[in-house]
Amino acid sequence: MANIRIYNRNAISTAILSGGSWMASLPLENLREQRPKLKARSTNTVTSSTQFRVELTAPLTVLGIQLVSTNLSSAAQYKITWYEDATFTTVVDTTDWQSVGVTIDWSETDDWLDWLDPDFWLGATPFVDPDNQGRDIRYTFAVETSVQYLKIEIDDGSNPDGFVEIGYGYFGRAFIPSTNIDFGASFGRDSLTSVQETPGGSKFFNRRGSRKRLTIAWSALPSAEVLGEIDDISQIHDIDLPVYVDLDPDNLTTGIKTAFLATITKIPDYQLVAVFFGDDYGVSTGFEFQQVI
């Protein structure tokens, strides 16, 4: 299991967004809105309509890019290309086309879907989304990569909705601790469903889905990390600006469950501990994250 990643300081808030064909009532500008339910929606599924450009105000060193709460189907593909110049003419590199659906492990015959299921023919594991929160796209770069001018293309011509929706874009730096979080991290969901009970004891529910919650801790990290990057994240993001937390970034199957846009529920405390990292002393700390929906 790779170390947790906490993406922070999202650069999309000051980026220039352009390209594609997006509905006037649900424009591309919604990618910077910190409410994933407020989508950017393309006018159709033609690839010339479902692409867009992101021009950052300065070069950014990234390890991952996230598109939050999309309606992309298991058959969809996407490609990220970054350029040297603001005219988007000189290509630096590209991810090539990446599949959105997670490939079925055909060696595990017990996990095969019914042959009438469309995902069987796509060779993709089903995406379960009863709360209609959408699918996050998590692209992880193999190495730290400097980007400024990016084009994102989406190919989802068979999307049953007839359009592509994206709730939020995250283009931030990644904090990766030198030591992974302690065992005992807690992941769960808080129900948003309300209930009313009659005098006779009957219950009536207003189904509103659930919100992910993740609690993590380190019994000891170098003070340089805690009083450096972690404290910077705490000050900059406070409890209102979202981070993107990815508990298991190399896990392409169940890892999607524990990766989400989140706010910090409480600014963390720091406690000195009797652990030393060379000339540096140890500090214990932790976070609780709550999903932004």
Image (cartoon, grey):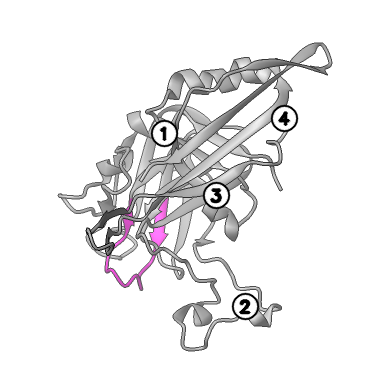
| Cα distance between the residues tagged 3 and 1 | 15 Å
Identify the residue at horizontal 26%, vertical 41% (top origin).
29
Give whichever of discs 1 and 2 has the lower sequence position. 2
| Cα distance between the residues tagged 2 and 3 | 22 Å
* Any part of residue 159 in sight: yes
Q: Are marks 1 and 4 in contact (CB under 8 Å)?
A: no
Looking at the rendered image, the disc whose residue lies closer to the viewer, 3 or 4, is 3
Give whichever of discs 3 and 1 has the lower sequence position. 1
Looking at the rendered image, the disc whose residue lies closer to the viewer, 4 or 2, is 2
* Any part of residue 88 in sight: no
Mark 3 = which residue? 258
Residue that extends furthest to the bottom in the rendered view of this protein? 116
Nearer to the camera, 89 or 97: 97
Give whichever of discs 3 and 4 has the lower sequence position. 4
Query: SS of the residue at dot 4?
Result: loop
For the residue marked with disc 4, what is the amino acid? Ser
For the residue marked with disc 2, what is the amino acid? Asp
Q: Are marks 3 and 4 in contact (CB under 8 Å)?
A: no
| Cα distance between the residues tagged 3 and 4 | 20 Å
Identify the residue at horizontal 56%, vertical 66% (top origin).
102
**Residue 178 shows which numbered tag?**
4
Mark 2 = which residue? 111
| Cα distance between the residues tagged 1 and 4 | 23 Å
The image position of residue 285, as x and y in percent, is: 63, 24
Q: Which residue range is magenta in the image?
A: 152-166
For the residue marked with disc 3, what is the amino acid? Thr
